[in-house]
Amino acid sequence: MASGETTRRETEGKETGGEEATAEGSAGEATVDAIGLNCPMPVLLARKALAKLPAGGRLTVIATDPLAGLDIPNLVREDGHALVSQRREGDRFIFEVAKGGAQP
């Protein structure tokens, strides 16, 4: 995906209150906007975005589902990544993840 390019699609063809948007910034950085999406979508989108990043790449996940506060840290731990930071801003949960794996 080109720098600054954004893709959008409705999730499972039903209204969720938000749309999934993944934007990739500079090489090795991406953002998953899971606002309005419920479990398991934030985790599935985060896993998909992490698969596209190189080892050491950074992913920001923004979600409103309260279960993301448990699910994203579990994904990070189980898949061998590092949770750089986790915070809450109003109704949003924001996670900064560094992709694990050997550097090329």
Image: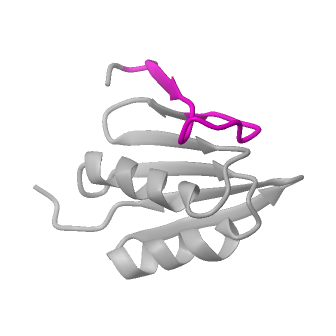
Nearest to the observer: residue 30 or residue 45 = 45
Span highlighted in magenta in the image: 3-20
For the point 52% across and 28% down, the residue is 9
Relative vertical location of residue 15 with respect to residue 6 in this rendering, above or below: below
| Residue that appears at 51% across and 41% down | 31
Q: Position of residue 66 (x, y in %)?
A: 77, 66
Foreground residue, 21 or 58? Answer: 21
**Residue 56 appears in which quarter of the rendering?**
bottom left
Where on the picture, by quarter, is residue 87? bottom right
In the image, residue 18 lies in the stretch drawn in magenta: yes
* The C terminus lies in quadrant: bottom left
Q: Position of residue 49 (x, y in %)?
A: 38, 47
* Rendering coords of residue 103 (x, y %): 16, 60
| Quadrant that contains the N terminus | top left
Task: Give the colour scheme of this rendering.
Answer: one colour
Residue visible at 33% across and 19% down in the picture: 2
Residue drawn at (67%, 57%) of the image: 38
Q: Left of 57 or right of it: where is 12?
A: right
